[in-house]
Image (cartoon, rainbow, N blue to C red):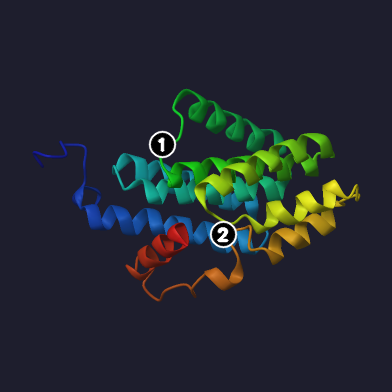
């Protein structure tokens, strides 16, 4: 019996390094599936990676990144109600616990940006403009750049019709999605290589 983990814990699961390699391996597989257009399969892997990261009490950088990847796949699938529900929960959290530093302000700005983009995809330009304006305001306070927000707001202020194809092209041009070909390394020869850990950490902090 392992005194720290209890009788139900197998030796590999009790090893923090093994646990980290496993959830990173699963998340990286999810990213490759997302890039292949297999977003439902990607979601399954992100959710499993999230579960393992939380169970292992990993640093917040991991499960925040996995959550972002999952939200991107939901958006790609057109599951807009689920993405908006997340945004609303995050905004309510910050309403109850106001951001106290620039990192938290930047996080809230990105939430409003995501909400605005989704509302625009739902053909609600007025709602999108309001959300993106708030994102821009918060980004200014956090001293962070949101080029997608700035560009789309300009289009809306000019009264332009923004079709989904044009919006998606701008999202990709402005590197809105964290899961993209240029941000992934080739699959490692070792399926649980520690190199995958560096990939996830770099993506999460870029």
Q: Is residue 159 above or below residue 191?
A: above
Q: Which residue is mark 2?
A: 178
**Who's the residue at 42% across and 61% down the image?**
200
Q: Is residue 85 left or right of residue 20?
A: right
Mark 1 and mark 2 in contact (Cβ < 8 Å)? no
Q: Is residue 44 visible?
A: no
Q: Is residue 141 left or right of residue 84?
A: left
Q: Where in the figure is residue 6, as x and y percent of width and height?
A: 15, 36
Q: Nearer the viewer, mark 2 or mark 1?
A: 1
Q: Is residue 101 left or right of residue 119?
A: left
Q: Where in the figure is residue 106, as x and y percent of width and height?
A: 51, 47
Tally of numbered discs: 2
Q: Which residue is mark 1?
A: 100
Q: Is residue 156 visible?
A: yes
Identify which residue, 21 or 138, lies in the foreground. 138
| First reached walking from the N terminus: tag 2 or tag 1 | 1
Q: Where in the figure is residue 49, as x and y percent of width and height?
A: 43, 48
Within 10 Å of the Cα at label 2, are there few (<14), some (14-19), or many (20+) other Cα atoms? Answer: some
Residue 176, image quadrant: bottom right
Q: Which mark is residue 181?
A: none
**Who's the residue at 80% across and 53% down the image?**
154
Q: Where in the figure is residue 151, as x and y percent of width and height?
A: 75, 56
Q: Is residue 199 above or below residue 130?
A: below
- Check disc 1 and report its element: helix, strand or loop: loop
């Amino acid at each position: 019996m392992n005194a720290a983990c209890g009788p139900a814990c197998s030796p590999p699961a009790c090893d923090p390094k093994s646990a980290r390699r496993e959830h990173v391996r699963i998340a990286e597989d999810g990213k490759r599936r997302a890039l292949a257009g297999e977003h439902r399969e990607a979601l399954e892997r992100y959710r499993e990676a999230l579960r393992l990261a939380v169970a292992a009490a990993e640093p917040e950088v991991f499960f925040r990144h996995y959550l972002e990847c999952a939200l991107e796949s939901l958006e790609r699938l057109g599951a807009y109600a689920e993405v908006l529900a997340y945004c609303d929960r995050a905004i309510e959290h910050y309403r109850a616990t106001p951001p106290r530093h620039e990192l938290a302000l930047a996080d809230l700005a990105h939430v409003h940006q995501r909400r605005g983009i989704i509302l625009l995809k739902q053909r609600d330009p007025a709602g999108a403009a309001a959300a993106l304006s708030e994102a821009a305001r918060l980004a200014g306070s956090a001293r962070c750049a949101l080029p997608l927000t700035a560009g789309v707001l300009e289009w809306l202020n000019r009264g332009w019709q923004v079709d989904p194809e044009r919006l998606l092209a701008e999202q990709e041009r402005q590197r809105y999605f964290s899961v993209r070909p240029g941000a992934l390394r080739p699959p490692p020869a070792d399926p649980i290589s520690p190199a995958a850990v560096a990939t996830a950490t770099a993506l999460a902090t870029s």
